[in-house]
Amino acid sequence: MILLRSTAVYLATLLWALIFWVAVLLPVLAVSVLPAGKRRHCMRVMLLWFGLSTVRFAWRPFFRIRFEDRAGRVRKPGIVIANHRSAIDGFLVSLPKLSMAQTVNDWPLRLPIIGHVARAAGYLNITNWDYDTLRLRAAEVLASGDPIVSYPEGTRSESRTMGPFRSGIFHVALELKVPIYMLCIAGNEYMPDRKFRFREFRDLAVRFLGPLPEEEIRECTTAYALKMKVFRRMTEELASLDAELDHEKAL
């Protein structure tokens, strides 16, 4: 059953990816001749709609995803902190409908097709760049009007408990003086697991929060203080989301 379930999701995702990217092939070729900054922004917009359409169409037969936007109409470019339970989080972060640059580890950037698209979109190499390079490239993304989404745990937790946050992206946020948003993703700790198996299908919940009030950020004189404030806030929200999902499942 697990093998059939996992195969079905991956086939649906692959089929939709082929349909989507063939459909936008001409726009992709067109933006390739634009200046670097505009080209990266256009690629982020295309990746946004690929992620959204995958979540809303390709995955719809398998599980439902409830999205709540509690950030109001505030959309000033900043850094979105997301928890990281599974490999599908890279798609789920499209739900706020923001053309974001993601922070990624080095290995996805080395993949033949995915890596090329990610590099073309100006995704940020969180593992191989030094801090000054990360800050410079982050500033370029934000100056283009796009936010950045980061997973400060650094790897998938595959559980309801977040791993410790790393400080790098919080240093960037403090130095660039940009807003901090939070994206809390619940329900997908085994969708898929570390062996890329969908051990279950269940409803998911995604909640977009923020920005943190400026006075709260000013109170944080170090990246450590800021990351712990965000960590505590997200821990509370995730516990609430998990409880809601468990209650709905039990009905």
Image: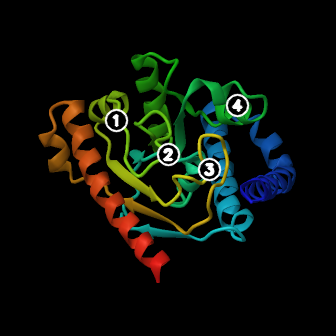
Comparing labels 3 and 4, the label whose residue is closer to the camera: 3
Q: Position of residue 241 (x, y in %)?
A: 38, 65
Left or right, residue 14 beside residue 107: right
Residue furthest out toward the left: 219
Up/down of 150 relative to 248, above or below: above
Disc 4 crowd, CA 10 A, few/some/many (<14, 14-19, 20+)? some
What residue is shown with label 1?
Answer: 165
Q: Earlier in the sequence, mark 3 or mark 1?
A: 1
* Residue at x 59%, y 40% (from the top left corner): 194
What residue is shown with label 4?
Answer: 115
In depth, the one of 111 and 170 nearer the eye is 111
Comparing labels 2 and 4, the label whose residue is closer to the camera: 2
* Residue at x 33%, y 60% (from the top left corner): 239
Comparing labels 2 and 1, the label whose residue is closer to the camera: 2
Q: In this orientation, does residue 72 appear?
A: no
Q: CA distance from mark 3 to mark 1?
A: 22 Å
Image marks 2 and 1: residues in contact by CB distance under 8 Å: no
In depth, the one of 14 and 199 nearer the eye is 199
Q: CA distance from mark 2 to mark 4?
A: 24 Å
Left or right, residue 190 beside residue 24: left
Comparing labels 3 and 1, the label whose residue is closer to the camera: 3
Q: Earlier in the sequence, mark 3 or mark 2?
A: 2
Q: Position of residue 67 (x, y in %)?
A: 49, 68
In depth, the one of 215 and 82 nearer the eye is 82
Quadrant where the image shows the N terminus: bottom right
Q: Earlier in the sequence, mark 2 or mark 4?
A: 4
Q: Amino acid at mark 2?
A: Glu
What residue is shown with label 2?
Answer: 158
Q: CA distance from mark 3 to mark 4?
A: 21 Å
What residue is shown with label 3?
Answer: 192
